[in-house]
Amino acid sequence: MDISTKNTEAPPPAPQPAVAQHKRAARGSTRPGDRIFLGLSRGSGIFLLVIMAAIAVFLTYRASLAISKDEANFLTAFEWNATAVPPRFGIAVLAFGTVVSSIIAMVLAVPIAVAIALFLTHYAPRRLSGPIAYVIDLLAAVPSIVYGLWGALILVPHMNGLFGWLNNYFGWTGILSWEGGAPRSMLTVGILLAIMILPIVTNVSREVFRQVPQMHEEAALALGATRWEVVRMAVLPFGRSGVISASMLGLGRALGETMAVATVLSPTFDIQASLLNPGGGTFAQNIASKFGEATEQGRDALIASGLVLFVITLLVNGAARAIIARRKEYSGANA
Amino acid sequence: MAKRIDVSGLTAYYGSHKAIEDISMTVEPRSVTAFIGPSGCGKSTFLRTLNRMHEVTSGGRVEGKVLLDDEDLYGAGVDPVSVRREVGMVFQRPNPFPTMSIFDNVAAGLRLNGSYKKGELSDVVEKSLKGANLWNEVKDRLNKPGSGLSGGQQQRLCIARAIAVEPKVLLMDEPCSALDPISTLAIEDLIGELKERFTIVIVTHNMQQAARVSDRTAFFNLAAVGQPGKLIEIDDTERIFSNPSVQATEDYISGRFG
Amino acid sequence: MSHAITDKRPSTLRGASLPKWSPYAFAACSVAVAIGIGVAAGLSSKIQWGLIAAVLFVVITYGVAARVEGRRQAKDRIATSFVWVAFLIALVPLVSLVWVTVSRGVKVLDVYFLTHSMGVVADSEPGGGIYAAILGSLEQVALATLIAAPIGVLTAIYLVEYGRGSLARAITFFVDVMTGIPSIVAGLFILSLMLIFEMQPFGFAGSLALAILMMPIVVRSTEEMLKLVPNELREASLALGVPKWRTILKVVLPTSLGGITTGIMLAIARIAGETAPVLLLVWGNPFINANPFEGAQASLPLYIYQQYANSSGSGAAYDRAWAASLTLIAFVMILNLVARGIARWKAPKTGR
C-alpha cells in the first residue's frame, strides 16, 4: 500500500516544469490576474489529489494497526470477531457478498437501462419521451436510504413468490435453491441494487445516445438501414464508451451501497451457496451494522475492510477507464 | 442500372408548414441534374423527399408521387428502408461513421444484407473506393478510422460508401459546401465519372458548379419567406445559363436577385 | 390479369409487410396461449404465465416477421419489442416506490411532525418528529457545499481552460477515481482522522465526508458545461485582447453559469440523501443540536434508517420513517426542479 501511496503523491511536484513551460507559452503574459487565477484553479486540482492521497494514507495507517493485531488471516478468514481478545477477523465473506450482489445488479440493470435509454431517444413517441426522461432524472436523485426502506418493507415480502418459483424449477442448480427463510438474501439485494442503479445508468446512457450526431444516423438511414440497424451502426458504437462509464458509475454505487443492503439483507458471517437463502454480507453493510458496538480496535478492523472496498472500487474504475481510453482513438477524433 | 425519376404534384410539409409545393419534374437516368435556388427555397427538402429521408425529420410528411421507373416511392406497402437502398445519399457535411475504419465504412451498407464472404467484401470495397477516386490515397490504411481523413477525402469516402450498395440514384446535398476548392474539384470530376453508372441529383449553392457538372438544371424559388418553395423551371443546363425562359431564373443567375 | 402480373414482378421497393396492428395481435395471441398452457398444465405462478407469454411473443414475432418481411425486419421488430418491454418492466418498481412513499408518508406528515423532534419519545411509540433531523441535515449539507463547490468549480476550470500536462491528466484520473469512492469509505477516512485526534462525533465531520463525495460530482458536471462553451467565444474574447482570466470570468463562466449551478444543486441533492458517512461520523441525536461543530447531530436520512432499524417492527416508527422519506424526497425533488428551472432560465441560448 505504501507504494501506491507514493504514487498518488508523486504527480504534483514532478510534472510542474513541463506544465509551467506549456502554460507560459499558452498564456504569453505574466499578468497578476492570470497568475492568481491559474494558481487558484491549479491549487484546487492539487488539493483534490492531496485528499485522495490522504484517504489512502490514513486508511492504510489505521488498517495496518488493526491487521497487525489480527490473529486470523485477514484475507481468507471466515469470521469477524474484531472486538475479541485476541481479535480474529477476515474479509472473505464480505468480498464474496459484495462482488456477487454487484454482479447480479449489473447483469439485471445494464441491459435494461440501455434499452430504456434507446427507448427514450429512438423509439418512444416524442410526446412521451420528454416527460419520462424527466421522471427518470428525478428518480436518479431518490436517496438510497429511501430505496432501502422500500426494499425492506415492500420488495422483500414480494420476493416470496419469485423465490418459490425459482426454487421449484432451478433449485437443482444449487445456487437457486431456497430453504424458505425470509427472502432477505443476496438475490434480493442484487435486485434492489439493480433498481437503484437503473435510473443513473439510464440517464447517462440516454445523454450519450442523444448526442449521437444526426448526420451519423442519417448516414445509416441513407444506406437503407432499419431502425435497429441505425442503432447498431451509428448509435451504439458512438455511445459505447458512454455506456461503459454509465455502467461504471452504476457499479461503483452498487459496490459501495451501504444503507439499502443494511436494511434488506439479513446478514450472517458465512458464504451461502444459494443466492436465495438469507445470509452473507457486503463490506459496506458490515461496516454500518457492526459500527455501533465496535471498540477502537473494532473500528480499525472495519476501516481495514473499508480499505479493501476502496481498492476494489479503484480497480474497477481503473479498468473501466482503460476501456474508455482504448476507444478514444475513434470517438475522440470525431469531437 | 440507373433509373429514371418522375415526380408529379409533390408537396412536402414540416408539421403544418408547407415547405415545397406542387413540384413535378423528370430526371433522366445517367445524367446529372442540379438544383439551384436561394436559401430556404426547399431544394434540399425536395432532394430528401426523393429517398424518403424527409419523413425522418419530426413532422415531415409528403403528398404527391415520386416514381422510380414507374414505381411510386410513396405507394402503399413501400418500405422506406428499401427505397433508401435504391436511392443513395451524400450529405452536406462528410459523415463517415466515426467508430468504424475506412474499410468498415465502405462495407457498412453491404454488411446490412449479410452473407458476404471476406474476399467478396474486400473486392467491393476496393471497387467502390476506386470508383470514388480514393483508393490510391487510403489503400495502405484501410483499418484506420475514417474520421482521420481530410474533409475532401471523407466526402469521397462517403460517396464510396453510398455507391458500394449499388444504388440506382445518387442524391448529393451540397456535397462540396464544406470543402476547399481542390477537394471540390476532385468531387466534381468524380461526379462526371459517376454519371456513367448512376442517376445523379445534386443540390448546390454554387452556380458555377451547377454549370460545370450538370446536364440539366432546376431552379427553385419562393415567393416570400414563409411561403412554400416552388420549381420555377427545369431545362438543359446550357439553356438555363444562357437563355432561361423565366425572368426570375435569369435574375438569379446574373445576380440581380433581391 | 396483366395488371396483377405487373404488380407481382419482383419489386425492389415493396417488401411484404405486416399490418400496423400485428404487434398487438401477437401480444394478445401469446398471452392467450400462455394462459391456456398455464391453466392446462396447472401452473400456479403468474410469473410463469408471464414468462411463457413473453417467450411466445418473441418467437411468434420473429417467426412471422422473418417469414413475411425478412430477417432484417424481424430483428428490427424484436429490438423494438425488447426496448418497450424493458421500459415497462422498469416502470413497475419505480412507480411502486413513489406511490408507497407518498401514500404512507402523508399519514403522519404534518406541521407538528416537521417542527418537533424525537426527544424522549420512544422509537416504538407514536409522536415526535424530524425538526432536529432537518436542521442537522441542512447545516451539514450547507457546510459541505461551501467547501466542495468552489474547489470543484475551480478544478474544472483548471482542467478545461489550462490543463494539458500530466498534472491535468493525474487530476482527471483521480477525479474519476473519486467519483467511484463509496460514501462509506469517505466516512471511514474522516473517522480515521477522528480516531487519531480522539474526537467525538459532530456534524461538521459529516460535512467533510459529504464534501469529499460532492467534489468530483461538481468537477465532472462543471467540466461538461465548460466544454460546451464554443471555442469561438473564447477566441473572440482573447482576440479582443482580453486577458485569459477575465475571458474565463466574463465569457466562459457566465455562458455556462446555468449549467454549473444546476450541476451543483444536483450534487447537493445527491449528498443530502447520503446516510452511511453520517451514521459513522454524526451518529444521530433525538434532541435538537444546532451546533454542527460540537456534539452528535441528527440528520434526515440517518433518521429514516434509525426509525427503521431501531423500531423492532413498530408501526409508529415505520410511519415516521416513511414520512421522513417523503420529506427527504420532497427536498431533493425541489432542489432538482429548481436546478432545472435555473438551467432553463439562465441558458436559453444553448438550450435545445
Image (cartoon, coloured by chain):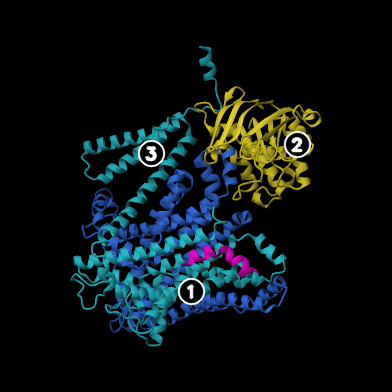
Mark 1 / mark 3, whichever is N-terminal: 3
Q: CA distance from mark 1 to mark 2?
A: 61 Å
Q: Which mark is residue B229?
A: none
Residue B160: say if magenta.
no
User: In this orientation, does residue A265 appear?
Assistant: no
Q: Residue furthest bottom?
A: C197
Identify whether A41 is placed above or below B135: below
Give whichever of A132, B107 is nearer the camera: A132
Residues at discs 1 and 3 both on one chain: yes
Chain letter for blue, please. A
Chain letter for cyan, please. C
Disc 3 crowd rating (10 Å Cα; few below 14, some 14-19, many 20+) is: many
Disc 1 crowd rating (10 Å Cα; few below 14, some 14-19, many 20+) is: many
Q: Which residues are magenta?
A: C247-264
Q: Nearer the viewer, mark 1 or mark 3?
A: 1
Chain letter of disc 2? Answer: B
Q: Is residue A329 left or right of residue A260?
A: right
Q: Which mark is residue B252?
A: 2
Q: CA distance from mark 1 to mark 3?
A: 50 Å
Instruction: Say which residue label 3 marks.
Output: C58
Q: Is residue C177 left or right of residue C119?
A: right
Where residue A305 appears, x then y in whole percent? Answer: 38, 74
Instruction: Say which residue label 1 marks.
Output: C148
Q: Amino acid at mark 2?
A: Tyr
Give the overall secondary structure of the magenta segment: helix
Residue C262: say if magenta.
yes
Where residue B94 appears, x then y in whole percent? Answer: 66, 46
User: In this orientation, does residue C172 appear?
Assistant: yes
Q: CA distance from mark 3 to mark 2?
A: 58 Å
Chain letter of disc 3? Answer: C
